[in-house]
Amino acid sequence: MKNRRGHMDCARLGRFLDRPGFPWKKLIVGFSISQYIFEGLLSLRQYQILKQTKPPKVLEGEVSQEVFDKSQAYGRAKAKFGFVSGLYSQIQNYGVIYYDVLPRLWALTGVWLTRYVPEKYSGEIVHTLIFFFTFNVITTTLNLPIDYYSHFVLEEKFGFNKQTIRLWIMDMIKGQALMVVFGAPLLSGFLAIVQKTGNSFFFYLWLFSVGVQVFAITIYPIAILPLFNKLSPLEPGSLKTGVEGLAKRLEFPLKELYVIDGSKRSAHSNAYFYGLPWKKHIVIYDTLIEKSETEEVIAVLGHELGHWKLGHTTKLFGIAQFHMFYIFALFSVFINNRSLYQSFGFHKEFPIIIGFILFSDALAPMDTVVKLLMNILSRTFEFQADEFAVNLGYSTQLAKSLIKLQIQNLSTMDADWMYASYHFSHPILPERLGALGWSSGEKANGKKLDAEKPIKASDREL
């Protein structure tokens, strides 16, 4: 009874939102421009912080003026690049909408389907696959200049890029190949579920997405990661003994310890774990081992395993599933919204994939709020994982490692509170050191560090 009432409520909401002549296009363009302006204003606030000439007080005894100046210059360079790349993305997005690229490309790929594909394979699923991969090739090509500049100009200038042109191209080719190999069956499954399960499709779509995530966790280290990086077993020694001892102490189901050749592409450094609940693998970047003391690496892993022991990974997975279910349920409200399709030039055909793309654009304001809330939660978890490492006895080692990585990464030493709240999933270093009880009188190395050999941290920093 409750299930039927829920379907009726969704149907009523769907009819309410499906209003002929409603300016969906103007609304979505307005959302996009407003978000760009808002994020631009936040970046301007952060840019003022990046013009400061002195490091935060807690880092004064750790960071030389030369390193701080380089860090600030790197931050300003990334901020300028972010403004330009964001503007370029806005122009692309506006061009796609203004020139009705979506309906034109859908019609063109429909012609290709009729001419070159046998009739028994015709239909919305095959048409969608042709449309999707064509659109992906177009957007990838348009973004090549931005991607090239990021790697071979910006990152190269500050000593972070380790890729060659050949490796960069090969990575793109492999990425496109994986898109076809895995994307085609996943997208086909998505469409088939929507077509065949009626008004309850969102529930089955959610179950499908959960299965895909479990499959990805299983297959990624076996079939995908080796295409880009080499994983080698960690050699016997004090580090391996220490990590295995830590895992045993925490009852962490460690199966294998690997070293990854992260230095192949970048000077970044990180450590992480992956796997199913009963069989986990720890991966340590070669650059982290090279630039850190053994106890500091173990302290980093103490932090990472703290996320596992405290249930952070399980909680985030659960939140992600709830969010996914909510998204699919909302999509069921919009999937038959003719006014939304018509606003973007689809008057006779109403493809599922187009509906999902437009729905995602309409959902942008909510995504912004979700991003803010998830970053707040993530920063809370980071403090808790730091505290967990402290309780293991690694307070000093963790603080030293964080300082080293911050300096070697040329990471931002300080941040505007509003910018950090919106963008950062991790607390800034001064906040973390304050929570660890670190004072600038304690040296990470007994002297101020330099940045002769920078290590650029990956997106998922410690």
Image (cartoon, rainbow, N blue to C red):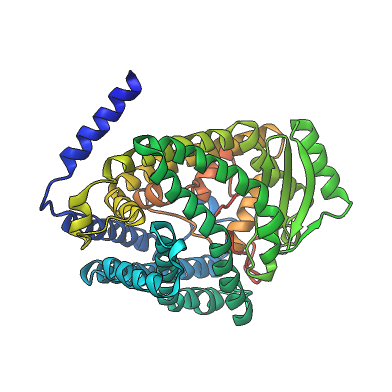
Task: Name the side, left or right, on which 159 lies relative to 368.
Answer: right
Quadrant location of the N terminus? top left
Residue 167 rendering spot, x and y as whole percentages: 63, 76
Q: Residue furthest bottom?
A: 165
Q: Quadrant of residue 40?
A: bottom left
Q: Quadrant of residue 327?
A: top left
390 up-or-down from 426: above or below: above
Q: Residue furthest right?
A: 236
Task: Name the side, left or right, on which 135 lies relative to 346.
Answer: right
User: Could you say which is closer to the camera, residue 159 or residue 68?
Assistant: 159
Residue at image x 29%, y 66%? 102
144 up-or-down from 57: above or below: below
User: Could you say which is closer to the camera, residue 137 or residue 300?
Assistant: 137
Residue 310 rendering spot, x and y as whole percentages: 61, 31
Residue at image x 49%, y 57%? 413
Residue at image x 45%, y 41%? 205
Q: Quadrant of residue 289?
A: bottom right
User: Could you say which is closer to the camera, residue 135 or residue 408?
Assistant: 135
Tell me if I can see residue 199 in this picture.
yes
